[in-house]
Image: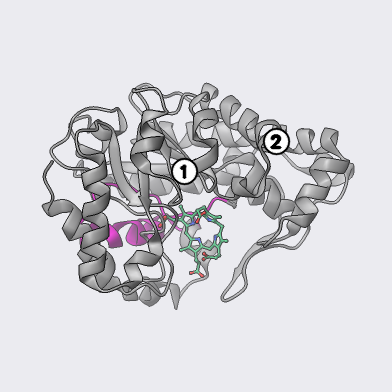
Amino acid sequence: MNDSLFIKAAFSQKTERPPVWMMRQAGRFMPQYWEIKNKYSFLEMCKTPEIAADVTMLPVDLLGIDAAILFCDILVTGEAMGGDLSFTQGVGPKFANPIKNARDIDNLRVDVMDNLQYVADAIKVIQQRLNGSIPLIGFAGAPFTVMSYLIEGGSSKDFKLTKLFIHNHPDLAHKLLSKIAAVTADYLNLQIAAGVNAVQLFDSWALALCWDDYKEFSHNYNVEIISKLNRKDIPVISFCKGSSVFAPLMAEAKPDVISIDWNADLKDIKHRLPSNIAVQGNLDPHILYADKHVIKDRIHRLFERMRGENGFIFNLGHGIMPDIPFDNVKYAIDVVKEFRY
Ligand code: CP3
């Protein structure tokens, strides 16, 4: 695996072209996803290793990406700790028992790896199917982002309850974040032990926070988690929306790769980071709605900017939207794969 484009780029080694994978590559923009989704609930899909493996393999077989990502969700840690999680079409994730007070936090369990064993089982099935062809990325949600779902009870536009909670009850927020961080480190180590080749920490909603709050309620816990990982030759990718601003701070957690949202000039960010930290990103996913010549032009523009840089993984600045045409995604991947530095 250490010879794969993805692992080499993640460790800031020279590659003949940037490797490519896309956040949310195993999902609803693929008609083949719906053939499976119509038969099972989302959580059934995650919890049945053969089905999770089938979905993980869709973009491998249909798109030819350079890394697979485990099919699961960032909220399964919250569920394992005691959150009553469901996913409803058109509504998104819901926790029916949102966290409101100290007792709710005390009731959350931290010794929960048995509840997440299905993920280890899925990883083993996926690795058999991949059979050494490309690396498999495992992942988890970062404590702040998972906490926001546990407090809001679902997705939020303004994170009003979460911010009120950290501002009015910082001690309780830290208690909750510490519990999630402990589970998250165990969970990523469980995935590493089961055989993933890289891990990505998703702090999707960090962009909601001001600098001081990001540092105190998000970053510090990501540092703790990354420091606890059994990394060996497993690259660690740190992603957040907000990385255009937070990347220099994210670097202090010593990930191997920082995944950058689409607001930043990728080269500029890369030069502000230690040279042994690779960058991943950062095409605006909306570009994938556009005409093919626009897609090609924008990808080439990004590559021109990154020419001569070691440590660049092509990805989007955030996940693929469900209504992006499959053909356009496939086209973008082909454009990346034809490119040579
Ligand atoms: O990237 C992949 O293809 C691997 C699988 C994956 C899913 N979710 C599958 C999924 C990954 C890596 C995630 C991460 C995730 N989940 C994040 C972080 C990444 C990001 O986009 O910021 C977040 C914030 C979630 C929480 C979540 N899960 C939401 C808000 C939703 C509903 C809205 C939406 O975008 O779908 C989900 C559901 C979900 N997770 C689906 C999939 C394929 C859709 C389920 C369905 O079929 O209805």
Q: Secondary structure at mark 2?
A: helix
Q: Which residues are magenta?
A: 47-74
- Residue at the spot x=70%, y=31% of the render? 216
Counting from the top left corner in percent of width and height, residue 10 is at 31, 33
Q: In the picture, residue 278 is in which quadrant?
A: top left
Q: Quadrant of the C terminus?
A: top left
Q: Identity of the amino acid at label 2?
A: Phe
Rendered image coloring scheme: one colour
Counting from the top left corner in percent of width and height, residue 305 is at 26, 43
- Residue at the spot x=77%, y=56% of the render? 160
Counting from the top left corner in percent of width and height, residue 41 is at 52, 70
Label 1 Cα neighbours within 10 Å, binned few <14 / some 14-19 / many ≥20: many
User: In this rendering, does residue 103 appear at all?
Assistant: yes
Q: Above or below — where is 274 with respect to 105?
A: above
Label 2 Cα neighbours within 10 Å, binned few <14 / some 14-19 / many ≥20: many
Tell me if 216 is positioned left or right of 265 in this view. right
Q: Which mark is residue 31?
A: none
- Residue at the spot x=24%, y=33% of the render? 309
Q: How many marks?
A: 2
Q: Above or below — where is 185 with respect to 55?
A: above
According to the picture, the residue beneath numbered tag 1 turns out to be: 139
